[in-house]
Image (cartoon, helix red, strand yellow):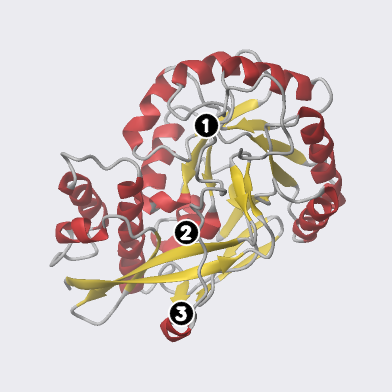
Amino acid sequence: MKITGYRCLRTFHDWGRPVGDVNGFTDPGISEVSIVILETDQGIEGVGMGSHQDIDRLFPAIEGEDPRAVTALYDRMLARVFKAGHSGATFGGIGTLDTALWDLKAKLAGEPLWRLLGARDRFVSGYASGLDIALDDDQLATWYRTMGERGFASGKLKGGRDLDGDIRRLGIVADALSGNGVTPAVMLDANESWNLRQAVRYVTAIEARRDLTWIEEPLRRWDAAGHARLGTAIHAAVATGENLTGLEQFTPLFDRGAVDIVQVGCGWGVTHLLRVAYAAHSRDLPVSPVGLTANPSVAHAAAAVPNHLASEVQDLGSPFGISVDQDFIDGGVVLGDLPGNGITIDEDAIAASHHAGNWTAPAGPHVRSHRAGLRLVADADTVGG
C-alpha cells in the first residue's frame, strides 16, 4: 500500500454559545475546522482533523510511503522542515497528517484505534471545560449542570482577570457539578495572562477561600523557572504544556520540576501525545490532553497510555458534517468499535454548506492582549483588551 495524495476540507463547529478565554472570545461561537484526507492506491482513506498549515510542504515526506510506518513517517515530516523548524503552526500540519496515518493503520488492521494502540478499556475519563469567559452566571450554571448530568464531576473555569468574580464563578461550577455524590474538582485556566508575582498573589487569594485542584497556564509557556517557583508557593498543582510544539520543548519543564499536570494539545496529533505521555510517565507525572473537540482521535491515544489523568471535554457536539463514534457518559468519553479513529466525514454536506467561523479573529482567544501581565488592577469589563 502507498500514499498517493490528499485533499483538504474546511467545515465549522457551532458551539451554541460564545467561547473564549481571558485573551478574548468569539460571539457567535462558530469556529473553523480543518480536515485532511489521505488517499492511498488501495482506495482506503485516512481522516485527520486539526490544521492545514504547511500540508503542501510536509506531504512529500510521506508521499509514496506505506502509511503503516506511522512513527517513522512522523519523524520524516519533522526532518522535512528541519531548517525552518517544526514548532508553531507547522506542528499542527504534522499532527493532522499524523492523525490521518494512524486512522489508516487502524483501518487496515480492522480495529478501532484505541485497541490498536493497546488500550484495555474504551473509557477515557474527562473533565468539563466550557471555554466560558463570556458566559454570565446563569449560563455558566446551566452549561455545567448539563455536563454534570453526563456524570462529569470536574470542571475548568476560564479566568484570570477578576479575582472576586473568579472565586464566585468557581463556586458556581462546583455547585453545578455537585450532583454526582462527590466533591467536585475545580480548576482555573489563566491562559498565560500573568507574570510570576501576579500568579502567586492571585492563586494564594483563591486558595484562602476555596480548594483549587490546578492552575493552568499561569505563565508564558516557556517559563520553566517561573513555573517551578510558582509551584513551591501555592497548594494547587501547576498544569501546562498544551501549546508546546514538540517533545523537546517539555525538557526544561521536566528538568526543573516545573509541571505537575503535563498537558498536551490534541491538535498536535497522536504520536506527540504518546511520546510526551511516556516522557512524563518516566517522571511519575500524569498527562492530560487539552481540546478533544479539535481532534477526537487523541482520546484513543489517551486510553492507551498508563498515566492518563483526564481529558478536556469542551462540547458534546461535533463539527458540521463530521460524526464521531463515541459517547459522553459517566464523566468521560466512551470510544466505539468503528475501525480507525471513529471519524466519518460527509463531504457532500460540507461542500454544500457556506457557513464559516474565524477562531483567530482579533477579538478572539488566539490573539494575546498587549497588556497581558502588565496590569496593576483587574479590568473585568474588557476581557481581551
Residue 81 rendering spot, x and y as whole percentages: 19, 45
Mark 2–mark 1 CB contact (< 8 Å): no
Residue 308 rendering spot, x and y as whole percentages: 53, 44
Question: Total of numbered circles in the picture?
Answer: 3
Of residues 32 and 28, the one drawn nearer to the viewer in this rendering: 28
Q: Is residue 272 left or right of residue 212?
A: left
Which mark's residue is nearer the viewer, 2 or 3? Answer: 3
**Distance between the alpha carbons at the discs numbered 3 and 1:** 36 Å
Q: Is residue 351 left or right of residue 168?
A: left
Q: Is residue 67 left or right of residue 178?
A: left
In the image, residue 228 sits, relative to residue 152, either above or below, namely above
Say what amino acid the circle numbered 3 marks: Ile
Say what amino acid the circle numbered 1 marks: His
How many residues crowd around disc 3 within 10 Å: few (fewer than 14), some, or many (20 or more)?
A: some
Which mark sits nearer the N-terminus, 2 or 1? 2
Which mark sits nearer the N-terminus, 2 or 3? 2
Residue 136 rendering spot, x and y as whole percentages: 80, 50
Residue occupied by mark 1: 370
Q: Is residue 353 left or right of residue 67?
A: right
How many residues crowd around disc 1 within 10 Å: few (fewer than 14), some, or many (20 or more)?
A: few
Q: Secondary structure at mark 2?
A: loop
Is residue 120 among the parts visible in the rendering? no
Say what amino acid the circle numbered 2 marks: Asn
In the image, residue 240 sits, relative to residue 116, either above or below, namely above
- Residue 295 - label: 2
Which mark sits nearer the N-terminus, 3 or 1? 3
- Residue 252 - label: none
- Residue 350 - label: 3
How many residues crowd around disc 2 within 10 Å: few (fewer than 14), some, or many (20 or more)?
A: many
